[in-house]
Amino acid sequence: MAESDVKLIGAWPSPFVLRARIALNIKHVDYEFVEEKFGSKSELLLKSNPVHKKIPVLLHAGKPICESLIIVEYVDETWTSGSSILPSDPYDRAIARFWAAYVDEKFFPSMKGIAAAPNEEAKKAALEQVESGLAFLEEAFGKISKGKPFFGGEQIGHIDIAFGSLLAWLRVTEKTTGLKLLDQAKTTPQLAKWAETFCQHPAVSGVMPETEKLAEFAKLLFAKMKGINPQ
Amino acid sequence: MAEENRVTLHGFWASPYSKRVELALKLKGIPYEYVEEDLRNKSQLLLKYNPVHKKVPVLVHNGKPIAESLVVLEYIDETWKNAPKLLPEDPHTRSQVRFWASFLQQQLFESVLKVLKTEGETQEKALKQVSEKLNLLEEGLKSFYSDGNPCIDIEHVGLHDLVLVSFFGGYKVYEELLGIKLLDPEKTPLIYSRLTALADLPLVKETLPPPEKVVALLR
């Protein structure tokens, strides 16, 4: 069997892997998905990402690219098929990169903070952080989308990918806390609508994890984490 | 004053994030106005320009603000296309430059700060972490520069170089002041040679803050 030119090492639950898959789908790139087994790291992964030993790793003609947002930019720069992921104007690009970094450095950790909260008070504080993050993103969406369906305008862009990849985990969080975080009626009407549109997009719908399946996985993951003895 | 092509940088003298943006502006010969922010008493303008993080640096170009130093650096590189090119043309090499810039920023910085701020056993642990991360960086740079180590001059400075020198430029003074060894030319020769070449550039020397002052601020 011929060696595939494009390989993605990943796992279905990971939002970071999802980013790479969406980007590749947007560009209509054929790739081999190399699924990592839960709880172990393959030789290929350790060899391709010796620094972080993490997924996703994109292998293009044997050369590895690591870190999900770096992969997305690489895909955008390498393949001209499909639509552009980053805008063409330098200022708009800076805005896109700013919000993608915000999702990674502030928003995602605040989401994790809910699950990791040791007591009700910590959980409440974490939830407030997530809610204020969503308020920022709701405002940003209004300014950046300019009335179009995505942050990227008519098509999915960099911020859509960075933030949209977290939607399944956000839904699992809503399930476990019983709270509506993306709220059509009250706090985040634009984002609630955007989330629906995003998940139905052909580049996303086939790869976005189902909430039920992910919720089951989350239980497994947290059980495993609690079962590990701290050193 | 006309807004046309007006560049303002809101920064803080001791912030490596702020300094790397200053370095980029100076290296590219971009005229700019500098606003020193008092981080205990941030200006209304800063809070308006960066409501999300309320941090420096913020670059304002033609009245439009950009925050987050790495984002600012890429913006500068895309807007002023003269040398030095902070990012190369080739997508794979670009991804590597971004990778190492991000590694330096996220992995190395925490440990370096700890070393500068602490003492005794805590400092020992932090030093060990710095050493491990530097080894990883050395290995990575070896393959990155496998075609040969390009010389450092003001026309050839990359994004990752700016991150490296803004964090580590004052390393010798930190070592002297704190009686520690941060960088070993024998263990990490590539990092050592790049860093010293960068730190020796006159523009870099005159831009980076006096390391003694930075240590005094932290301790």
Image: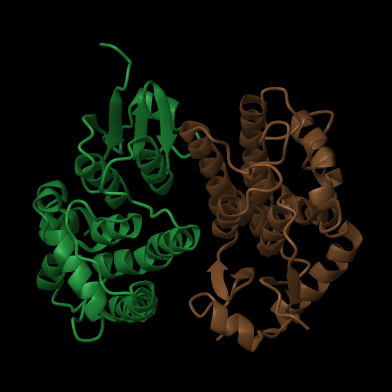
Residue at 68% over, 48% down: A81
Q: Please give left or right for residue B56 compared with residue A26 in the image.
A: left
Q: Position of residue A135 (x, y in %)?
A: 65, 34
Residue toward you, A68 or B14: A68
Question: Which quarter of the figure is the N terminus of chain A placed in?
Answer: bottom right
Residue toward you, B125 or B108: B108
Residue farthest to the top, as pictured: B1
Question: Does the image show residue A183?
Answer: no
Q: Chain A: give its colour.
A: brown
- Residue A69 occupies quadrant: bottom right
Residue at 44% over, 33% down: B50
Q: Please give left or right for residue A124 compared with residue A197 in the image.
A: left
Q: Can you say whether B55 is above or below B15 in the image?
A: above
Residue at 35% over, 77% down: B146
- Residue A141 occupies quadrant: top right
Q: Please give left or right for residue B56 compared with residue A214 in the image.
A: left
Question: Does the image show residue B94?
Answer: yes
Q: Position of residue B130 (x, y in %)?
A: 33, 75
Q: Position of residue B28 (x, y in %)?
A: 23, 41
Q: Can you say whether A81 is above or below A138 in the image?
A: below
Residue farthest to the right, as pictured: A212
Residue farthest to the front, as pictured: A2
Question: Which quarter of the figure is the C terminus of chain A placed in?
Answer: bottom right
In green, which chain? B
Colouring rule applied to residues: by chain
Residue at 38% over, 35% down: B79
Q: Position of residue B39 (x, y in %)?
A: 30, 39
Q: Can you say whether A9 is above or below B27 in the image?
A: below
